[in-house]
Image: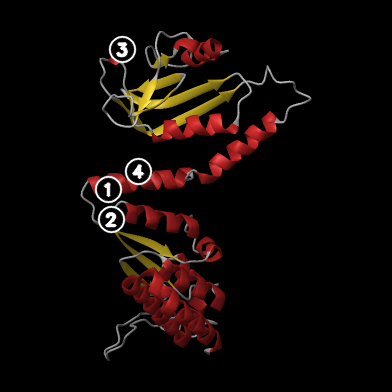
């Protein structure tokens, strides 16, 4: 079985890109190491097949023909994921590292199972679903690569136009993104030691008190370095302007000449009053600064009571 599978995989690959272990028709073991130093203490596991591309590990294949237990599958998967290099005398002991994206394939044969008495296939299916549930989705893996590349290129600060903390409102805005993706992007950028800022809009056409609260509470929950809220600004020729052109109260926004904490005006008639939206902005910014400067533990003592109380006040405000 091992050699048959190896032959089939090799038929789709360029020459000399597949490394086989002895069971697959090769002449060697395929050890994976945690570091570029080859030793017994840094060797994590041996695998059945490696696919190389441009001298990087692109794919790891493990084949099992016996009565495989979950610990065997998870153990090989985890040790392969934790390893960083393939080192062997056939490559002059030069460390070959992992590519930015590596595919792990676990092939489990069922030919030796007694079909009417075993529940192994169902167990393997559940195991696959469990593994997928803890692996970052493809979108988040892309964020990680992009954030790492930006940091290495010298990027120290980035800004996201997230706009809303409610998925229904993001759909109205045609953002083609979700709240979950926004949180992942912010978290990955922070993990890459990049300062993060974000922009949000409150009072977009179609919003309710509930969606406004979703936005300010979501925004203030993110680990941001900079946060900005605005009210919608309908510019002629934009879809937003076309939505509210019959309800425009003021055609152009002008910065207030008298000092104001929140320098935003609502330019169109809306079920949500300008006072309510100003309150929402003040609430979101206050929560942001409480979390930023008092950290998580203090936020539970001060920020959360403030958040719940101001949620109530916003709903009572006209």
Residue of label 4:
145
What numbered label is drawn on residue 150?
Answer: 1
Cα separation, mark 2 vs mark 3, equals 41 Å
User: Contact (CB < 8 A) between labels 2 and 4?
Assistant: no
Cα separation, mark 4 vs mark 3, equals 31 Å
Place of residue 90 in the rendered image (x, y in percent of width and height, measured from the top left): 31, 12
Is any part of residue 208 visible from this angle?
no
Badge 1: residue crowd in 10 Å (few <14, some 14–19, many ≥20) = some
Give the mark, 1 or 3, whose residue is nearer the N terminus: 3
| In this view, 300 is above or below 80 | below
When asked about the image quadrant of residue 85, the answer is top left
Residue lying farthest front?
41
Query: In the structure shown, which secondary structural element does the residue marked by tag 2 occupy?
Result: loop
When asked about the image quadrant of residue 306, the answer is bottom left
Task: Choose mark 2 or mark 1, whichever is in front.
Answer: 2
Give the mark, 2 or 4, whose residue is nearer the N terminus: 4
What numbered label is drawn on residue 90?
Answer: 3
User: Contact (CB < 8 A) between labels 2 and 1?
Assistant: yes
Of 27 and 175, the residue lying toward us: 27
| Residue 242 horizontal side relative to residue 260, left or right | right
Query: In the structure shown, which secondary structural element does the residue marked by tag 3 occupy?
Result: helix
User: Contact (CB < 8 A) between labels 4 and 3?
Assistant: no
Q: How many marks?
A: 4
Residue lying farthest left?
154
Task: Choose mark 2 or mark 3, whichever is in front.
Answer: 3
Cα separation, mark 1 vs mark 4, equals 9 Å
Is any part of residue 111 visible from this angle?
yes
Badge 3: residue crowd in 10 Å (few <14, some 14–19, many ≥20) = few
What numbered label is drawn on residue 232?
Answer: none
Residue of label 2:
194
Give the mark, 2 or 1, whose residue is nearer the N terminus: 1
């Amino acid at each position: 079985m091992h050699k048959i599978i190896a032959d089939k995989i090799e038929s789709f690959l360029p020459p000399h890109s597949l490394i086989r272990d002895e069971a697959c028709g090769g002449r060697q073991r395929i050890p994976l190491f945690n570091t570029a130093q080859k030793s017994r203490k840094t060797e994590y596991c041996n695998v059945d097949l490696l696919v190389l591309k441009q001298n990087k590990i692109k794919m790891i294949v493990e084949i099992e023909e016996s009565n495989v237990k979950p610990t065997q599958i998870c153990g090989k998967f985890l040790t392969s994921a934790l390893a960083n290099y393939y080192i062997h005398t056939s490559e002059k002991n030069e460390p070959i590292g992992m590519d930015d994206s590596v595919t792990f394939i676990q092939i489990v044969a069922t030919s030796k199972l007694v079909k009417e008495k075993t529940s192994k296939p169902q167990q393997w299916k559940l195991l696959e679903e469990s593994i997928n549930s803890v692996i970052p989705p493809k979108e988040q893996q892309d964020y990680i690569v992009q954030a790492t590349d930006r940091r290495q290129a010298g990027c120290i600060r980035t800004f996201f136009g997230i706009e809303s903390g409610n998925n229904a409102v993001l759909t109205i805005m045609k953002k083609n993104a979700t709240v979950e993706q926004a949180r992942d992007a912010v978290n990955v950028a922070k993990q890459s030691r990049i300062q993060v800022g974000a922009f949000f809009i409150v009072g977009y056409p179609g919003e309710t008190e509930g969606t406004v609260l979703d936005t300010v509470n979501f925004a203030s929950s993110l680990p941001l370095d900079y946060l900005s809220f605005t009210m919608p600004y309908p510019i002629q020729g934009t879809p937003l302007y076309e939505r509210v052109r019959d309800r425009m109260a003021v055609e152009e926004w002008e910065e207030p000449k008298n000092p104001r904490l929140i320098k935003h005006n609502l330019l169109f008639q809306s079920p949500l009053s300008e006072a309510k939206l100003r309150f929402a902005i003040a609430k979101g910014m206050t929560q942001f600064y409480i979390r930023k400067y008092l950290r998580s533990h203090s936020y539970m003592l001060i920020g959360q009571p403030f958040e719940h109380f101001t949620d109530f006040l916003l709903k009572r405000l006209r």
